[in-house]
Image (spheres, helix red, strand yellow):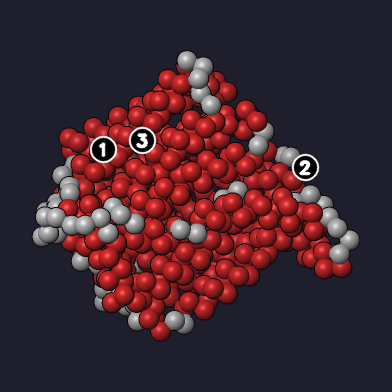
Amino acid sequence: MEKNLFRKYILLWFSQSVSGLGSSMTGFALVLWAYGQNQSAMSVSLMSFCNYVPYIIFSLFVGDFIDRHKKKTIMLVSDSIAAIGSLAILIALITGQLAVWNIYFINIVIGITNAFQQPASAVAIGQLVSKEKISNVSGMNSFSSNLIVVFSPMLAAFLFSAGGLSLILLIDLASFAFAFCVLLFFIVIPEQFQDRKHSKLFAGIVDGFIFLRNERGILYIMLTMALINFFSRLTYENILSPMILARSSGKSIALGMVNACMGIGGIIGGVIVSVKKESTHKATAIYLSAALSFLFGDLIMAIGKNTFWWSVAALAASLPIPFIMANQNAILYQKIPSAMQGRVFAVRNAIQYSTIPLGIILGGYLADYVLEPFMGSESMFAIELGKIVGVGAGSGMAVMFLCTGICGGIVSILSCFNREIKKLNGIGY
């Protein structure tokens, strides 16, 4: 029975990965299209902002709903609404009515559907996969997501030049149809509903936070991961690309190589996690992995002066990420009762991702209006920093990587010594 469920998960994982590739290509193509309309980097940042904010807000309210309804149905409906969004963009494009604000609106809708789809999918994984295989499954997910990171920009760029945005949208819709049919006809997700038939709007939030109040170690993991996400998004989300382009005199091939190495690092990490045994010190592994990512990835990215070192930094930053996700998921699935996973995962998403929109907006502001002008000044401090990160265009953004590397590394290392977090080592043994 267990092997049969795991085979079902493999099929679900493959179909969702195909759909994820289509969605990723659409996202990349929309960035190309939007930037081509007004040459504004802020318009691109706002696309991510419009996706994250509703996702975070709705994540606070959906947990109880997810625990009381079929996860399969939630996933099917959520994916269908997202597909309707892609179809709406395609129709607007064909009729010549597509505008950047249309994409913002669709991203808001997709952010809302993701607030339902992602925790429902997380609970479904717990029902299809034994707790002993959760770390391996996390590795598989990291492998597929990073494979998408490597190939979707190349495929999207080629298809965008060959057939335009409309071709990519059609491929996205086809990939959705494939994943939808697999989930509808071939996947049966065992259900464990909570007993209550009626609940108030805030009941799921209250239940989730009550659980976290009693499980302080898990709560502290979520809070520290929110801070780690803030430092990460401050740079990688919207600063990495302009920094590489600025420091390489606009060479897109340099940016492509760095992005590819970032995806390759994630793939390598995902493969290792998917085949290795679970760590006996999961909580410590989370923060040691995060510290390695910051101290080697961000710092080398800051002081690197050429494509080789930026690529090394990209590998160093991304390879530990699957270890963070795998060990965190292993702890959560072990500690959270199945009937409560929807509520707790939804609250987890709201907490951990709440800092991402701030990181995205603040990163762009600091780069354009604070650190780039500062590094171009004659300040003695700027001159001293220039000896570390270099001078010229992009040096201010390099200083941002220097700061996130130091701050993120310190937060990660200090988190290892938190008493409640340390208690979570050895979960499952």
Disc sitting over residue 146 in the figure: none
Task: Give the residue pinned by disc 2.
Answer: 249
Query: Could you tell me residue 76's position as x and y percent?
Result: 25, 38
Q: Where 417 sits versus 309, above or below?
A: below
Task: Give the residue pinned by disc 1.
Answer: 77
Quadrant of the image containing the C terminus: bottom left
Seen at 72% across and 61% down, the residue is: 399
Image quadrant assignment for residue 12: top left
Give, as a three-letter code, the residue at label 2: Ser
Mark 3 secondary-structure assignment: helix
Q: CA distance from mark 2 to mark 1?
A: 46 Å
Quadrant of the image containing the N terminus: bottom left
Q: Where 254 sits versus 300, above or below?
A: above
Horizontal side, residue 123 vs residue 294: left or right? left
Give, as a three-letter code, the residue at label 3: Ala
Q: CA distance from mark 2 to mark 3?
A: 38 Å
The answer to whether the residue labelled 3 contacts the one labelled 1, judged by CB atoms less than 8 Å apart, is no
Image quadrant assignment for residue 353: bottom left
The mark that comes first in sequence, 2 or 1, is 1
Q: Nearer the viewer, residue 286 or 58?
A: 58
The mark that comes first in sequence, 2 or 3, is 3
Q: Where 166 sits versus 364, above or below?
A: above
Seen at 87% across and 68% down, the residue is: 380
Query: Could you tell me residue 91's position as x and y percent?
Result: 42, 20
> Which of labels 2 and 3 is toward the front?
3
Local packing at callout 3 (Cα closer than 10 Å; few below 14, some 14-19, many 20+) is: many
Q: Nearer the viewer, residue 11 or 349?
A: 349
* Residue 195, visible in the rendered structure: yes
Disc sitting over residue 82 in the figure: 3
* Residue 129, visible in the rendered structure: no
Horizontal side, residue 133 vs residue 58: left or right? left
